Amino acid sequence: MAAVPWCAETRGMRTLALRCSALLAVLSVAAGLSDAGVAAAAERPPAAVVSIELSGTIDPATARWVETALAEAAEERRALVVLRVDTPGGLDSSMRDIVRAIGTSDVPVVAHVFPGGARAASAGLFVVLAADVAAMAPQTNIGSATPVSFGGGEPDEVLGRKIENDAVAYVRALAEVRNRNADLAERMVRDAVNVTAREAEARGLVDLVAGDEQGLLERLDGFQVSGPRARTLDTDGVRVERRDMPLQYEVQQLLVNPTVAYVLLLGGLLGIVLEIVSPGVGAAGLFGAVALVLGLYGTAQLPVTAAGIVLLVLAVGFIVGETQAASFGVLGIAGIAALVAGGLLLFDTDSDALAVSVPIAAASGALLGGFTLFAASKAMSARSAPPRSAAGDLVGSLATVRSALDPEGHVYAQGALWRARVAERGGGGPRVAAPAGSHVRVDAVEGLTLIVHPEPKELP
């Protein structure tokens, strides 16, 4: 075998050395990156828990807020979401939107009926049962989920059974998927049963009772979540970020309140009616337009009845008719009664938490209807009265001489400057001059000239 030249052997050894050096460098960098990653992980703050406010009625504004908050928590990769529930109930459609948002959330959701004195009534029961963990604070209660109808007509027994059975099936499905007491949940729908936090825990309707968020997180550490998102929760050392409902959702929640929507709708309609009956008022039409738009915004998001709409239209027609025809108040009284009845029957929310307040409906209907009727009748009376002559009203009034009357000059009468002439004296005697600053009394009006005579006594 031929001998390898010395130079070739040297080059091979150099190449091997370079390769070993490069490999060592790569390993050193990788080790450094690994150590940096461990250090960063050690310094990284603990995972955050988002605590979301869910208070007041469950309506479209509440549903949008919860959906937005859950989506943001998922984007921020939060470890857990806690819903602080305190609600008397609300719309079935909005409740189902919240339940769907909880069911599709990428972050586990804990429903906590909190603080003491809070409740999860009606639609709130469904929200609590939909959560991965159902918790309550002491001195809270849950239940009373029987659907209620405010349609105004005779109850349809078959339709009522359908609505109730649908709610029962829904609440049982939510309870059973996480091994909670479905029978008790059904009784809360059929018989409006309501229980305390301790009783709900003892009977297996909720998972635990915790007085505050810190105690809740301690109880949740190591908790085994059942259902579609089964997992073991790790809440040791987590930090809590509280998020209350922003102002924009609070305003929306106010506008979709049936009582507020009814008052705004009523004020808007009557303001526009007043502007039509008495053009030129301006403020009434402007207020009416703004109130009507706000009222329609709230009304559009609530289930309305045909009877309520017809009654409001009739009420406006009666009030307009009273201003045009002498009905001795019959049409006006009928219009006010229709306003009140229309408000009470306008919305059919299937919940006593979202209904028009009877005292407010009666008071606002009578007050706004009566005021509109009074103002419209006064405006119509003024328009139908015979015109009065402004110049004729000057006769007999006092005027102040601005430039001496000898016999003609100028006087200031009732806010305007007039040409004036001293009246001739009886018997054809000479006219008496009136110096500037003196006072004269108007005897007659000839075109744009006042006929005056000097007033013997100066004004005090």
Image (spheres, grey):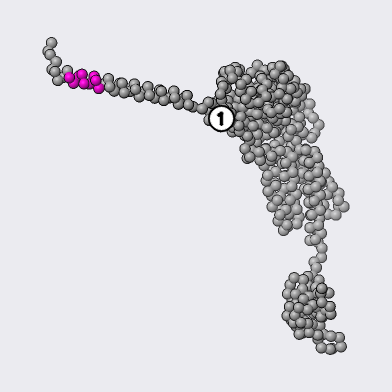
Q: How many marks?
A: 1
Residue 261, given in percent of the width and then of the height, sits at 72, 41
Q: Residue at x 78, y 44 (%)?
A: 364
The vertical placement of 108 against 279, above or below, is above
Q: Nearer the viewer, residue 242 or 103?
A: 242
Residue span colored magenta: 10-18
Q: Residue at x 82, y 77 (%)?
A: 458
Residue 263, given in percent of the width and then of the height, sits at 74, 43
Q: Residue at x 74, y 22 (%)?
A: 196
Q: Pointer 1: what residue?
A: 73
Which picture quadrant has residue 433? bottom right
Q: Nearer the viewer, residue 213 or 176?
A: 213
Q: Most prominent secondary structure in the magenta stretch?
A: helix
Q: Residue furthest top?
A: 1
Q: Residue furthest left?
A: 2
Task: Point out the image quarter for the C terminus.
Answer: bottom right
Q: Residue at x 81, y 42 (%)?
A: 362
Q: Is residue 107 visible?
A: no
Residue 355, given in percent of the width and then of the height, sits at 75, 35
Q: Amino acid at mark 1?
A: Ala
Residue 27, given in percent of the width and then of the height, sits at 34, 21
Task: Point out the image quarter for the N terminus.
Answer: top left
Question: Dot 1 surroundings within 10 Å: few (below 14), some, or many (20 or more)?
Answer: many
Q: Nearer the viewer, residue 388 or 151?
A: 388
Residue 128 is covered by the magenta coloring? no
The vertical placement of 364 against 41, above or below, is below
Q: Is residue 246 visible?
A: yes
Residue 12 is covered by the magenta coloring? yes
- Could you say whether the residue bearing mark 1 is in a helix, strand or loop? helix
In the picture, measured across the screen, residue 352 lies left or right of residue 103, that is: right
Q: Nearer the viewer, residue 456 or 36?
A: 36
